[in-house]
Image: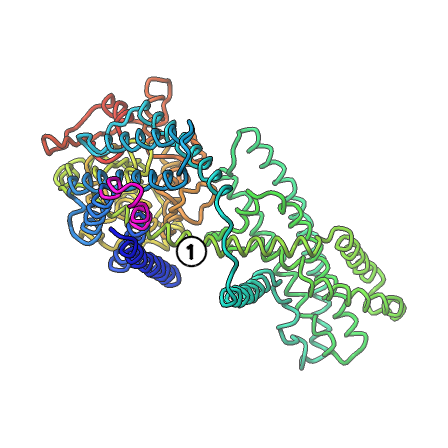
Amino acid sequence: MNTDHVKSIRRCLRWVIAVSLVASAGLLTWAVMAKASDVVRTHFLLTFAGLAVGAILAYIQVGAIHRSPRLVYVGAVAIVASQICYFLLVWSGWTSESLLWRIWWLTMVPSIASTHLMILRAATVGRNDLIERGTKICVYILGLLFFGFGLYRHLLHGLLPVHKWFIFLFAGLVLVGSLIIWRQWARGRAKPAPMSRGVRVAWICTSYVVVLVAGWYLGRSSAPPPSVFDVLPSALAGVPPERINVQVRLDLDRLKMLTVRVEELTQRATVLDEQLTQRSAADGRTLYLPKEEDQIRRMFMSFLSVRTALLRLALTYAGFEAVPDPDLKARCFTVGYAAAMTVFKTSLKFVMTYEDSPMARAKLNEAELRWDIRAGMFDQIYGSVTSSRNLDLAAEMAAYFESRRDRWREANIWPTEDFGWLETVIDEGVEYVSEHRIGRARAWMERLAERVKEDAYSPAYAAQTMIARWIGDVRIVEQDPLITIAQIESIETLLKPGDILLERRNWSLSNAFLPGFWPHAALYVGGIDDLRRLGIVEKEAVKEKLEEYLTPASDGRNHTVIEAVSEGVIFNSLTHSMHTDHIAVLRPRVSKDQIAHAIVEAFRHQGKPYDFEFNFESSDKLVCTELVYRCYDGILKFDLITIAGRQTLPALEIVHKFAKERLQPNPELEFVLFLDGNRDTGKARRASPDDLCESTGRPGIFSE
């Protein structure tokens, strides 16, 4: 192949790479902005992403054809074969064919390995030292390892710990060696030719556009929220003076009560934060327990309600200028200003209590409909106490009050005792704000950091959600569940409300991303008669979800299960939820009242979205085991484990808990049943508690 042909092929591949990347980015942006995805759009996204990867590999290989022609031909054949298999998996119904997955794996490995070797050869022309030879040998060994794993009877099934250690060892050697080689190559390469005039102009224009966009984004992201005092009309305009006079005297008494209450709440917030911090540090936890979350949210809800009442007073009398009578105007100003400074002072205290506690701050920013708390409420308060407009307005009002204070005292606009109390509240508020105000530069940087984090998180989480849903819907081998509907119907009489269901569906692609043999957990809540016997039908959390609960499930059966799946925390029928390959049922050994409490909690969580991050630190979104964990908080003790830096509870750990405690006095979980599927017989059999304990050691990738 001559040089012109190589250039033409690489030019075409560059276009394929560019178009594929642009199309992938466009489809991903579309899905994120629309906050939804469909099958066709997902297929197109996967198609363009696969094209981009294949074209990049081919582009690198074609460029090395004169140095390593044989390796290029082998790599090209592997790339073409892997692309064909990939597109068949994306667009056809062959995702259930394990042979096709195996061929794709066995062709992708040599494609990537040969491309890596070509890059190393290009960077080591004329040199052949120990690092270069060793790195290439490690690439060969790593490629053979992955190729060999694809030849297992069940794809990637049964990897031993020694296999994983070999992978980590040789992957680390390849990474370190490649970085050294590429650094040496970068240092020794020739300097680039100077830019032409057209290129320089293009770079200058691009830099101006980047600066303008960055400036717009920085300004939008870090701008403080507008002050509420600037956007609302006066509530006093046109109101008869007699009515205002009566109301302002009543509001003074109300202000005294609210001031005492909000001061108590800010003190309680400080004490509670210290207690929770000490508890979590003593237990080595990086998250609150559900009961602790309720404590902090209950306190926050109380603080918000009193703060809102004080803000209403401040806003009501912010229009004091509309009052014609001078003494009445002064009374309106002093009540409104005292309310505003109380809000400012206590909000600042509250912010300073939690601003350096990421765990508490994240919890206070969570939305929780049960407590009527909107998302981002802590940051909203933080923005209000660091707002330049609010600080300037407070300074203006302080100057206004100082210039009239003596005159108003002499005029007896309020009885001496009341005026003295108002002066004290105002002076203490002004002094505290001036001494403890948060620096504007720091506040600006924090607002910017939070906005950037939010803007980066939203599309990333949307993309993660879309991919996770696709993975959850893919089965490597399509087969009927081993547990039949008749078996499920026959065991339903054995179940009781509050039972914990553990489930596994073989050959589900999502199994590869979840630890252990048991990937899913659910909660059996029973039928309407069970809820009546527990005495919870009239509970508010149950009552408001009762209509949906009583509606038949998708398979026409009654809802008896609550579980967190990719669609969110939903009601489901037992026959739909249990129609899998392996089922275990464990029963908490607790009282009837505790079971009732757990089921009420499950109803409270129903309707929340699924947490594709498996983040137990937040409760606005839930993963399947988190539903069980939060419903039985304070009733059962579940030990969280750390995976990828986060504390979580895999379903496997619930079985581990049963296995560890079953021979001890007073175990918390009782064995109910285990339906164990067998692919060779095509049936599921009733198995023993010993079999359930043994299942924790089974491989957890695709097959049983």
Q: Residue at x 29, y 57 (%)?
A: 4
User: As rendered, which of 539 and 24 lies closer to the eye?
Assistant: 24
User: As rendered, which of 418 and 655 lies closer to the eye?
Assistant: 655
424 on left or right of 101: right
Q: Is residue 65 magenta?
A: yes
Q: Is residue 372 visible?
A: no
The relative height of residue 156 versus residue 266 in the rendered view (above or below) is: above
611 on left or right of 259: left
Q: Is residue 271 magenta?
A: no
Q: Name the kind of residue labelled 1 in the image.
A: Pro
Magenta-tinted stretch: 58-73
Quadrant of the image occupied by residue 176: top left
The relative height of residue 93 versus residue 698 in the rendered view (above or below) is: below
Where is residue 130? Give x, y as percent: 42, 27
Residue that carries the numbered disc 1 in the rendered image = 459
Q: Count all numbered tags in the image, as a single digit.
A: 1
Q: Residue at x 32, y 49 (%)?
A: 63
Q: Is residue 258 visible?
A: yes
Where is residue 145? Give x, y as percent: 28, 29
